[in-house]
Image (cartoon, grey):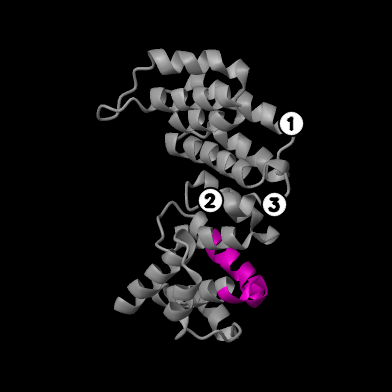
């Protein structure tokens, strides 16, 4: 159990918290940098959670220190593992980290599993999706009206983060569509903080009236915090500064 926890912690650190180069060398010097073996590939496919964690932790280090070439053969198998998690309604310990890992790699073969992760509100897929073709944007746009608050919010956050990483990926038509769908959300749903935040990027002068309405009249309150109002005000400020 201690070994499993250690590798899970290591795996999380490598994708959610950048390390200084000098520290990274010291902290991973004892981890083998040898090429991936067939045994390790089999463990990803068939092993228990502890074994998977151990192998994926080593692959994370290989990717950080040696580059994508050193872990290229493992990408399809990691995709398969993530698909196994995604076809269930259960929560899996490795799912978020696996999404983050595949997102960092940004291989086109991971396109669908990264899109699936947006719908499941798992991990940070924006990094990887921003490295794909612009067709992924059209898919994420359709998720802006998912049936859950969490799903809709995840889609809005993903588009915002993708634009921050690669604005050239977005066509003028896609930006217009995103803006229209986000405004539609403000008229349809009670929880709209993520949508207001996304409009701070995709909004323009035409969106100011509805954002002003939210900022001045919205009554949604979470423990004394008017999130919709706060994010609407932020969006207005960002639009006015452009």
**Which residue position holds label 3?**
132
**Callout in the foreground (2, 1):** 1
Q: Is residue 45 visible?
A: no
Image location (x, y in percent) of residue 217: 39, 13
The answer to whether residue 173 is left or right of residue 89 is right
The magenta stretch spans residue 80: yes
Q: Main secondary structure of the magenta part?
A: helix
The magenta stretch spans residue 118: no
72 up-or-down from 209: above or below? below
Tell me the residue at 51%/55% (across/down). Answer: 86
In the picture, residue 137 is in which quadrant? top right
Q: Secondary structure at mark 3?
A: loop
Q: Which range of residues does the magenta coloring cover?
A: 65-83
Quadrant of the image containing the N terminus: bottom left
Distance (Cα) linking label 3 and label 2:
15 Å
The answer to whether residue 9 is left or right of residue 37 is left
**Which residue position holds label 2?**
117
Distance (Cα) linking label 2 and label 1:
26 Å
**Which residue position holds label 1?**
172
Q: How many marks?
A: 3
> Badge 2: how crowded within 10 Å, few (<14), some, or many (20+)?
many
Tell me the residue at 51%/79% (across/down). Answer: 43
Pick whichever of labels 3 and 2 is earlier in the sequence.
2
The answer to whether residue 170 is left or right of residue 127 is right
> Is there CB contact under 8 Å for labels 2 and 1?
no
In the picture, residue 149 is in which quadrant? top left
232 up-or-down from 166: above or below? above
Q: Report the disc number at residue 81.
A: none
Distance (Cα) linking label 3 and label 1:
17 Å
Quadrant of the image containing the C terminus: top right
Q: Secondary structure at mark 1?
A: helix
**Callout in the foreground (3, 1):** 1
């Amino acid at each position: 159990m201690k070994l499993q926890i250690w590798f899970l912690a290591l795996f999380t650190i490598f994708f959610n918290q950048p390390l200084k180069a000098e520290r990274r060398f010291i902290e991973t010097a004892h981890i083998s940098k040898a090429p991936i073996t067939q045994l390790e590939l089999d463990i990803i496919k068939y092993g228990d959670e502890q074994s998977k964690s151990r192998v994926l932790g080593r692959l994370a280090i290989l990717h950080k220190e040696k580059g994508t070439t050193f872990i290229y053969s493992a990408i399809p198998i990691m995709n398969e593992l993530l698909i196994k998690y995604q076809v269930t309604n259960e929560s899996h310990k490795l799912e978020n980290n696996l999404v983050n890992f595949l997102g960092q790699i940004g291989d086109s073969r991971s396109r669908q599993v990264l899109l699936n992760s947006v719908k499941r509100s798992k991990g940070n897929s924006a990094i990887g999706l921003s490295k794909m073709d612009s067709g992924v944007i059209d898919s994420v746009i359709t998720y802006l009206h998912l049936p859950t608050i969490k799903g809709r919010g995840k889609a809005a956050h993903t588009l915002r983060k993708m634009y921050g990483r690669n604005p050239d990926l977005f066509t003028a038509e896609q930006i217009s569509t995103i803006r229209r769908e986000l405004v539609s959300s403000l008229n349809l749903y009670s929880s709209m903080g993520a949508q207001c935040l996304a409009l701070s990027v995709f909004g323009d002068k035409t969106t100011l009236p509805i954002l002003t309405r939210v900022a001045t009249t919205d009554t949604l309150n979470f423990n004394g915090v008017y999130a919709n109002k706060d994010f609407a005000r932020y969006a207005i400020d960002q639009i006015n500064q452009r």
